[in-house]
Image (cartoon, helix red, strand yellow):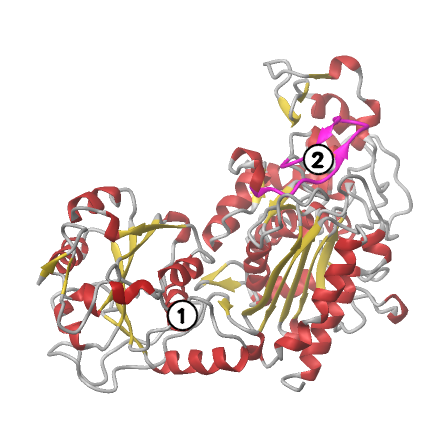
Amino acid sequence: MKKSKYGWFTVVISGFILLSTACAQQPPLLTLPAGPAYVTEEALTEQSTVLLNNEQNLVPLQDLDKSTVASVRFTNAYAPVFDSLLNKYTHVQTFNGLTYKSIDKLTDDLKLYNTIVLQLTDIDLNNTQLINFITMNDKLKKLVVVYWGSGIALSKLDAVTTPVIWCSRISAVAAAYAAQAVFGGVAITHKLQKGVSSKYTLGSGFLTAKTRLQYTVPEAAGIKADNLSAIDIIAREAVNDQATPGFVVLVAKDGKVIFNKAYGYHTYDKTQPDKITDIFDIASVTKISATTMEVMKLVEQNKLNLDSTVGSYVALARNTNKNNIKVRDLMLHQAGLIPYIPFYERIKVGDHSSDSSAAYPTKVADGYYMRKDYFKDVMWPQMLNSPLRARGVYVYSDLSMYFMKEVVETVTATPLNTYVQDNFYNPLGMQTAGFLPRNRFSKDQIIPTENDTYFRHTLLTGYVHDQGAAMVGGVSGHAGLFASANDLGILFQMMLNKGTYGGIQYFKPETVQEFTAKQSAVSRRGLGFDRWDPVLSKHYPSALASPQTYGHTGYTGTCIWVDPQYNLVYIFLSNRVYPKDSQLLVSRRIRPRIQDVVYEAIAKGLQP
């Protein structure tokens, strides 16, 4: 054995060479192969991957909202690929074990993580201190060993009960596949084809099911990648003609993310390119991603009755014309409410301040604070006393979701933002989704929206674009949610799965069916959800979408559409309102045209 420059880490010179030696100056190719080559390698990796020691069903990892996860690498040359894929599922902090002079220092840095994913190679398993580390943490923490190698060294793990994912293939695809296996993005379908130690004998192993999104290439879903290239052409048009500074597209087919790409920049000065991890103001997509989710859960739990009235839940509505409005009619936008109220136009000088204080606690934007109880004293009475139009007629109204927020918060005694964070976003592993993003993320991670010259007089970055939602402090039933495309992909894959994701049932299938099906006799709407339009000349949301399609659009230039017939989730996030409201994204039909490309690629299959 020869001691390396890292102090505690040793390598076997006969047979293996540490990456820091001259032989390793040409690192393996980290770029994943494309198309059929990826699919082939992925299939070979699946056949070469087994799961050992999983009696406690630790793999796939669950309880993400209760987990603090660390990934530790040593000589795994494909660690960047592996760690990148882990972070699709939840936040995972990465550690390079080779930078530590002692295993004790590494152990100390890991003390606040209750879940550790340990990346090992044949070289690593020949390190006695690493074996001791595994043994020490075997019962202390949730520990998952992911091992790529010949299998000869597996006998070193005979004494541990820690789950071991072993892949005999060593490649970038194998690294990506193993990371997804940790979280159930792919299933483990094989057992040992031969014995490799006294413990790990022929037939040993555990099988797992696919429970979360997989990240792969279009060909893995029967689509030729080249047939999606028209998305790039539409993107160039949108960005070059300033329909929007930039945007992100995500497509999931058959539970597999096959397309996720960012285009353009945060702003037209082109200093910060859009990234697929960027956080967008999703505007009215909030209605289905937050408020409707909570309504679904409460209806399912028999805590909320769709045919009860607003007055049954909201005391201040009882002596108004809103008393007898049914919750169902609010969700269908046929309660007779006016479309919106321009609340900001009625603000008086004393209603706001440039500094926060006990008298002005509600932050609307940087340097803009509303006075205490402004919503209760001014906005809420305006809504309660607003006129009603004909009941039973479809009129899309933001006021409906203001009212629904009051209803659900009364039922749960919990703020809307807290409820959805605790019951959906955190358990699902959604890392960016939530209201009030400036409380959790830096401005650089958030896409700016409008340069507001008429109300807040500032560029809005991380403060909700919708004026009314801003005036109530950034949390409203109709707007205020921010998220990345991947987070929304997770949420709506759960819906496409009829309410299950990651091995957890969030909704019963019949609840999903009820809310997303056509429920109105006078419009195309579901309960909270917008839907495919039967007037075919409208091509809404896409000329090729099936009648089962449901989702929503957002004013800032966003949309989510789920098409169960094609097992498809389509997400488009942009900031078309930067620096001011532009209709080009709508008039050029950028969102539906990209959606059309996806359907056309599905129809063509793997044909050129």
Q: Is residue 147 above or below residue 313?
A: below
- 177 to the left or right of 498: left
Q: Residues within 10 Å of mark 2 (few under 14, many from 20)?
A: many
Q: Which residue is mark 2?
A: 469
Q: Which residue is mark 1?
A: 172
**Picture coordinates of residue 596 (x, y %)?**
76, 70
Residue drawn at x 19%, y 43% as measured from the top left:
105
Whether residue 517 appears in this view of the structure is no
Q: Is residue 12 above or below residue 44?
A: above
Q: Which segment did they paint magenta?
A: 445-462
Q: Amino acid at mark 2?
A: Ala
**Picture coordinates of residue 427 (x, y %)?**
46, 52
Q: CA distance from mark 2 to mark 1?
A: 45 Å
- Give the image quarter of residue 603: bottom right
Magenta stretch, overall SS = loop
Residue drawn at x 25%, y 86% as measured from the top left:
193
454 within the magenta span: yes
Say whether disc 2 or disc 1 marks the residue closer to the N-terminus. Answer: 1
Whether residue 55 appears in this view of the structure is yes
Question: Which image quarter holds the N terminus?
Answer: bottom left
Residue drawn at x 65%, y 30% as measured from the top left:
473
600 within the magenta span: no
Element on which disc 1 rests = helix
Question: Which image quarter holds the C terminus?
Answer: bottom right
Q: Amino acid at mark 1?
A: Ala
**Picture coordinates of residue 342 (x, y %)?**
83, 32
